[in-house]
Image (tube, helix red, strand yellow):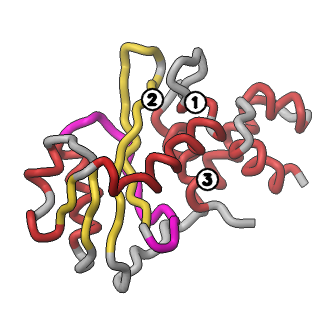
């Protein structure tokens, strides 16, 4: 029962201490179960037969508000499913990991106006307008609503990188 409740509580914006209270287990046990669950979730294969993907990033913090991290992810425009994500600093190296995985397909990559994408995505596979990223921008709002640690003006944020990545993996890919 507890094992089934943890992913639901993660996706409903319940913090670690709140989960411990609701499930009546220790905080360390909650953390351990989240990390174990996230490790057991396999990344789905990137669909090769899709026409286009939307890519965007959103900011969060680890430890304190001076330590910014970014979650960059790709959303399939047709199925609205997250196909890949990466957590890291907002650098070319971090985004290159995500983009290189998408370039293995023949799909078009839609991004916003961030100039790093211009150098990572070949011009014939790149569409760069804000209008073409409506689905992923809507998904960003859902993410911020469902994962408290991603809110813009909040005192809630991840204390370490592993928990941020684990909670993001659970939100994107956990299926009951």
State which quadrant residue 84 falls in.
Answer: bottom left
Instruction: Judge the density around disc 2: few (<14), some (14-19), many (≥20) Cα neighbours within 10 Å.
Output: many
Q: Is residue 85 magenta?
A: yes
State which quadrant residue 99 falls in.
Answer: bottom left
The boundaries of the magenta stretch are: 78-91
Mark 1 → mark 2, Cα distance in angstroms? 7 Å
Which element is circle 2 on? strand
* Residue at x 21% of width, y 53% of height: 128
Is the C-beta separation of discs 1 and 2 under 8 Å? yes
Comparing marks 1 and 3, which lies closer to the viewer? 1
Mark 2 → mark 3, Cα distance in angstroms? 17 Å
Image coordinates of residue 120 in percent, x first then y, are 13, 55
* Residue at x 63% of width, y 31% of height: 148
State left or right for residue 46 relative to residue 141: left
User: In the image shown, does 129 or 56 lie closer to the viewer?
Assistant: 129
Which element is circle 3 on? helix
Point out the image quarter for the C terminus: bottom right
Q: Is residue 164 magenta?
A: no
User: In the image shown, does 34 or 94 lie closer to the viewer?
Assistant: 94
The numbered mark at residue 60 is 2
Label 3, on which residue?
A: 170
User: In the image shown, does 37 or 85 lie closer to the viewer?
Assistant: 85
Mark 1 → mark 3, Cα distance in angstroms? 14 Å
Q: Please report whichever mark, 1 or 2, sits nearer to the chain's N-terminal start.
A: 2
The numbered mark at residue 149 is 1
Q: Please report whichever mark, 1 or 3, sits nearer to the chain's N-terminal start.
A: 1
């Amino acid at each position: 029962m507890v094992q089934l409740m943890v992913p639901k509580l993660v996706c409903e914006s319940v913090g670690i201490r709140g989960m411990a209270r609701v499930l009546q287990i220790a905080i360390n046990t909650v953390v351990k179960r989240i990390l174990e669950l996230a490790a057991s979730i396999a990344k789905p294969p990137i669909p090769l037969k899709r026409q286009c993907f939307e890519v965007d990033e959103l900011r969060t913090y680890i430890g304190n508000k001076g330590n910014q991290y970014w979650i960059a992810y790709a959303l399939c425009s047709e199925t609205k499913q997250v196909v890949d994500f990466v957590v890291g600093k907002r650098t070319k190296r971090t985004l290159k990991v995500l983009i290189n995985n998408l370039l293995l397909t023949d799909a078009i990559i839609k991004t916003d106006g961030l100039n790093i994408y211009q150098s990572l995505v070949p011009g014939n596979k790149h569409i760069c307008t804000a209008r073409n990223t409506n689905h992923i921008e809507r998904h960003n709002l859902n993410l911020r609503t469902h994962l408290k640690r991603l809110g813009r003006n909040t005192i809630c944020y991840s204390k370490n990188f592993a928990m941020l990545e684990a909670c993001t993996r659970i939100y994107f890919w956990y299926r009951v």
